[in-house]
Image (cartoon, coloured by chain):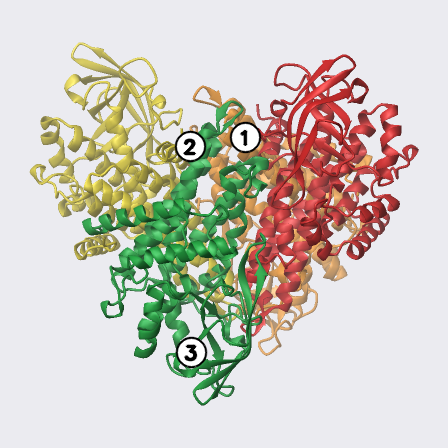
Chain colours: A green, B red, C orange, D yellow
């Protein structure tokens, strides 16, 4: 094995960290955690600002083919995720950059690639995902929204839900039932639409901590152009699967944990309890060390995913492991950190908060990675069925 | 031995349930989270009329004189429904007056509390966040007939709306259990500045700054320098009652989760048919059972006047963790919908974190348990 | 609620503890844990000795109707289990006293009751269970052993497995397929047999720690008399369910934990590490206290089960909770205790062992209660289906 | 970056696998547990012939001179199969001679070890059970040209069959890291008494009593009083290699469990179709993945000569717990059959407990981690 980055990668890493370190200084005060980019105007503006800074450097098209404006490598993309995670920065549109772009590259028409890839690479257009429906969460088979073809257009009706950032997004990508009589897996169409289109209504679903991340999106007779179909008409299921195949390394989440650990260690060194630094409490040392071991373990596995992606292997099962493990580690850290803060564990971002309120923030925000992008329960099913070859329940 | 709620207790519980379902729906709970006061004065009045604020006040002082166990069962229902405001604080702190107050203090305050005209809170913790005696540093200096208080208290429940406040202060140099004195003061006294701290449960815990607050010597609660045992008693009773509240919350989340699992269909079946989820709900059930009798053993002993500080600490340490764990599971079993503040489960999840440090954290109580199981 | 024992119960408790305390002094050195009664001749002799001592006092017929020699109450039975657990004593035949006797009382013919109940009460006869088969573990539907009726006899053939103590037992009770064409649940017969019968072969299955607890039992043309049927012919399934209904409070396992905690606390007080008693290590204090809370929690729940049994309510779901929780607590204790002993955690009962080797013993023996009497997984199914009313998988 | 086994490493692993499958079936593993020696001398000879005992010995001393990473991968296979006897001990302890031995010591012992003619063990721990320097109390007193050793060592792997032994002794008063000296001695020297301790893995760890054992000064390994850094190096390398062995065991149990779940039918379906079991096996898979790269990062750094004591301790602390957890899960997923000594899973379950304290327990290594992540 070889864990070493090439000299070029080391240099790139340094460059990326430097840019991110600078950007971090411009973070608005209200930006308290990884979902703050969606929570308010300031957060979204900062997201767009960072995105522009990255775009300038070609960092939103890392690993793409040159002909579509690609720069760098898949590994560079991982390095950017790492640095963004470490500094808790937005700026890379998870829907546009991480999900749609590779899907378009794999399954989009030349026309649609030429139209949208540059807009994604330049951070001109931000996307949202129109996916789950009230009765189709984990299971897309329950989908009821419809797209009825009329010449060059589809008339789309229905309700989508859990649409992260849909209240700020410029465009959306979604799947709709396009053939009421079609067989399962051959009755959906994958279409892009402008979120400003007539008939699109976005309504916020407040997150448990009061922040605005999720939305419901109502589609009433929305005209969507057939030229924005990705893949084939009625073959949206296949496109969904292509998209699901572009699992991320979750390096940003992992490096968020790395940073959280560093900050917590500093806090323990600086905070005295009963006249001694908290860091000298054997129980605290043991717990934080245990946590550090887990972080390092998942960090190395995330690098294995990156390594696989870099050689165009998918590593889907390892990626699922990273997703499950890192998100549950975040949950555990929220618990440990709030516990160790004693009564201060409950304090929200404010002048009284320790660690800028991050412990309380994680205590609630941890569910975002746990239940989104295929809940961890679903991930465990996937590992069991496709990774281990265990029989699927009937 | 009879480990059932008595018929009378069932009636007590049902009446609390019915009242709260009607008078304190979740819409009101949400509204009060962002309300400046954080409680509903009209509702408080009604609770006073029903005797809820005098459960543990002797009949001589216009209270109901119920047993501690009855009170715990009642508070189980309060926790099941959620009731914003310093209700449990007031009830718990009342014990200090009942057990350590002078006749004058009792006559003055107990009827008011019982009738819903007095909110009573406890200014205990400080910015060091410690639960043991060494955490008490706020100074009360004897000057003439007064004591003069200077310092800052943290996490004082509803201080901004309280009428009276028990302040835990240091009247002697040192950091031990001796030299701590409780003062029963007017919460609006000159020199007191109160600010609401934003907390996970939005439960209106306050920072209270005391600047040259003069307190007449007659307002000492109990004896000078000997306040710690009274505070310990409050911590013990508060631990049990807070655990009763949490246990109610546990049940609410359990019931909601099982109901949702029966109703929510995915992959052509209710999600409750999935074994992985079933086993988690079975674990919730097991946790409910183990919590319940641990709690009521402690409550029953308190009623009977038997030594129970070990059981009280065990209860608090165990249910603290159970409540956090089960509500987190509840969120996850609900999936996306369980993460929204529009849903009820997160109301309990956030309160589980808040409950966890009220009257002492898990680690604090585990240390008390260690001492009482003979760890030298 | 009322947690108080009556004065009579307190006196009975004292008496039982006294007898058990005396018996404990006679424990052979080789008796290292709760399954030692089956492991060797010495253990089995001690089991029979204790049983005789209990029988003398009428303690093997606690809670039975007076007409069958019953003495005392169900609560007394619980108190005996408590004391036996605390002193880690055998003497109450789990199969005869705890399972078969109540089953006979509920479903046996007058004749069979008159024959066997006195032998159980006097500790004359010890039973084993002939239940699981190689292809019928949790699921009895896979049972293939047969009982073919010939006049007043059944000719029984087949193989049974996981038969605890069958190598010492005098009699067995089992179920066999008696009607090859019968409908499911109406094709089994429940019969008692003498283990010395011709055609009965017992072969040990060594437990992971090398001890002899389990067996396989081969039945080759064994004649079993029809008069030893319990319930009706072909209706053995109903009897199995009656028997399964007599869940125990598991008070013995719970009090085994109570004792383990006490011994561990003493050990920590007496053992110095780095010049200080182990009991002053904050991490040790925290862990043992956590464990103590859990023990007290399950102890109170076990009393709730006893309380229910005492008023002839079954409390099956609570009993399942106690079984699962206590057995997994034992597993956890095995882990914590061996961990805290450092390199001594691995040492078996010997002159080098700390705590008489109990930590290492529990580290392995914990699986006995976890996988037997319906594995904990099955218990969780039962709670979900019958306790919570969740739909059974198809 | 390339986080795959190289082709050559795959060959190395396959040849170890094939050899052990043939030469060390589980029947032999069971037999050797209760054998007086605890290892198979004939097998040891063959391993010597194959070069297994000289993997980490430079070619100049008749070794193979493989990289540390190759060695770890080889040992992963050893752990997967289980190989009774002091193999890992001999390999790890050899590093002390390679890195700190005199030319004479090297010439004397390395070829013998490499050729399978010398079992080398380490007498480190004592009855205080401590892993840090303060645990070393066995005294070596300078007398003329000799050192005289008195004291008792515990948990010495295969001391009863070892040819040579590295003894960690105190040559100066105190309990710190300074004043510790390593001696490379004949394991059969006069005054040494050895007894096998019954342990969970029946792995023939010994109590070794030293009574006036005279050791010539030339048998000091490294420098007098400066043995601790060498021991630390052994602990670091041993931690990684022991973790590699455990990681192999983890895989074996995972594979057996998944295979059994596909094959065992209950309620008309393979038990692997039950979601509760599926999710546990998914968790096993996740644990395998996280263990693997943590381990090989540490091993790779060791090969490259990069500082890795943090990673080595993280690996040991993490895989210790993973191995115990996953083997316990393996037992439970197998149900009854998994609890029998006739079955292979318990072989690994018992070894997981044994592995856990070899080269330092989880808590010991977590403390080292705490120091190295900046906890003051």
Subunit of mark 1? C
- Crowd tier of the residue under label 3, counting other residues whose Cα lies within 10 Å: few below 14, some 14–19, many 20 or above: many
**Residue closest to the far right:** B60
Q: Position of residue D62 (x, y in %)?
A: 9, 39
Task: For mark 3, give the secondary structure.
Answer: helix
- Residue D248 lies, in percent from the top left, at 31, 50
Work out whether residue D335 can be spotted.
Answer: no
Q: Chain of mark 2?
A: C
Question: Which disc, if any, is residue C342?
Answer: 2
C-alpha distance separating marks 1 and 2: 16 Å
Residue depicted at x 43% and y 22%: C274
One can see residue C361 in this view = yes
- Residue designated by label 3: A236
Q: Nearer the viewer, mark 3 or mark 2?
A: 3
The residue singled out by tag 1 in the image is C285
**Rendering quarter of residue C189:** bottom right
In the image, C206: left or right of B8?
A: left
Q: Above or below — where is A288 with respect to A329?
A: above
Which circle, 1 or 2, is nearer the viewer? 1
Q: Which one is closest to the eye, mark 3 or mark 1?
A: 3
- Residue B340, percent from left and from top: 59, 58
What kind of element bears circle 1? helix
Secondary structure beneath disc 2?
A: helix
């Amino acid at each position: 094995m070889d864990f070493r980055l090439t000299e070029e990668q080391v240099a790139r890493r340094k460059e990326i960290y430097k840019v991110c370190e600078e950007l971090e200084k411009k973070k608005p005060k209200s930006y308290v955690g990884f979902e703050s980019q969606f929570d308010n105007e300031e957060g979204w503006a900062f997201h767009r600002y960072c995105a522009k800074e990255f775009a300038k450097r070609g960092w939103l098209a890392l690993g793409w083919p040159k002909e579509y404006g690609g720069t760098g490598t898949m590994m560079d993309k991982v390095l950017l995720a790492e640095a963004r995670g470490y500094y808790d920065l937005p700026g890379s549109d998870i829907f546009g950059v991480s999900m749609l772009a590779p899907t378009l590259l794999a399954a989009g028409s030349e026309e649609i690639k030429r139209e949208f890839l540059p807009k994604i690479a330049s951070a001109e257009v931000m996307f949202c995902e129109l996916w789950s429906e009230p009765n189709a969460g984990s299971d897309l088979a329950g989908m009821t929204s419809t797209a009825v073809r009329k010449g060059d257009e589809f008339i789309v009706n229905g309700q989508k839900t859990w649409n992260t950032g849909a209240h700020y997004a410029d465009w959306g990508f979604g799947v709709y039932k396009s053939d009421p009589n079609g067989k399962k897996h051959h009755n959906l169409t994958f279409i892009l639409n402008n979120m400003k289109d007539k008939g699109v209504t976005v309504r916020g679903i407040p997150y448990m901590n009061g922040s605005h991340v999720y939305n419901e999106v109502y589609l009433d007779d929305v005209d969507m152009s057939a030229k924005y179909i990705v893949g084939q008409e009625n073959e949206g299921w296949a496109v969904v699967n292509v998209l699901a195949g572009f699992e991320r390394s979750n390096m940003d989440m992992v490096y968020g944990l790395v940073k959280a650990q560093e900050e917590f260690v500093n806090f323990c060194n600086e905070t005295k309890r009963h006249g001694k630094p908290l860091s000298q409490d054997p129980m605290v040392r043991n717990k934080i060390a245990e946590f550090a071991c887990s972080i390092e373990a998942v960090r190395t596995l995330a690098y294995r995913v990156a390594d696989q992606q870099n050689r165009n292997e998918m590593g889907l099962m390892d990626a699922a492991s990273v997703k499950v493990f890192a998100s549950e580690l975040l949950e555990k850290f929220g618990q440990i950190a709030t516990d160790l803060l004693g009564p201060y564990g409950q304090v929200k971002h404010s002048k009284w908060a320790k660690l800028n309120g991050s412990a309380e923030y994680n205590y609630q925000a941890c569910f975002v990675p746990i239940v989104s992008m295929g809940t961890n329960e679903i991930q465990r099913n996937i590992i069991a069925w496709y990774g281990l070859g265990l029989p699927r329940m009937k | 031995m009879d480990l059932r709620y008595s018929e009378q207790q069932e009636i007590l519980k049902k009446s609390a349930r019915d009242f709260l379902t009607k008078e304190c729906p979740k819409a009101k709970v949400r509204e009060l989270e962002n309300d400046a006061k954080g409680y509903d004065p009209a509702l408080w009045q009604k609770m006073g009329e029903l005797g809820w604020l005098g459960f543990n006040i002797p009949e001589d002082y216009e209270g109901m004189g119920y047993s501690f166990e009855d009170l715990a069962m009642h508070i189980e229902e309060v926790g099941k429904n959620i009731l914003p405001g310093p209700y449990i604080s007031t009830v718990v702190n009342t014990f200090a007056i009942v057990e350590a107050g002078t006749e004058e203090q009792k006559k003055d305050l107990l009827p008011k509390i019982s009738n819903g005209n007095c909110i009573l809170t406890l200014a205990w913790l400080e910015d060091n966040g410690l639960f043991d005696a060494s955490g008490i540093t706020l100074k009360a200096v004897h000057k003439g007939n007064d004591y003069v208080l200077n310092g800052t208290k943290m996490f004082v429940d509803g201080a901004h709306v309280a009428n009276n406040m028990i302040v835990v202060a240091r009247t002697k140099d040192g950091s031990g259990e001796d030299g701590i004195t409780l003062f029963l003061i007017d919460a609006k006294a000159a020199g007191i500045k109160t600010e609401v701290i934003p907390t996970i449960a939005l439960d209106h815990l306050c920072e209270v700054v005391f600047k040259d607050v003069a307190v007449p010597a007659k307002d000492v609660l109990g004896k000078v320098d000997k306040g710690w045992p009274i505070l310990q008693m409050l911590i013990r009773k508060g631990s049990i009652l807070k655990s009763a509240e949490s246990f109610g919350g546990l049940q609410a989340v359990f019931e909601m989760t099982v109901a949702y699992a029966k109703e929510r269909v995915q992959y052509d079946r209710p999600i409750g048919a999935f074994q992985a989820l079933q086993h988690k709900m079975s674990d919730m059930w097991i946790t409910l059972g183990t919590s319940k009798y641990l709690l009521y053993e402690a409550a029953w002993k308190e009623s009977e006047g038997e030594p129970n500080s070990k059981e009280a600490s065990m209860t608090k340490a165990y249910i603290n963790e159970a409540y956090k764990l089960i509500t987190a599971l509840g969120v996850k079993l609900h999936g996306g919908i369980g993460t929204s503040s529009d849903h009820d489960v997160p109301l309990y999840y956030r309160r589980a974190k808040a409950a966890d440090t009220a009257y002492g954290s898990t680690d604090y109580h585990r240390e008390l348990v260690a001492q009482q199981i003979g760890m030298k």
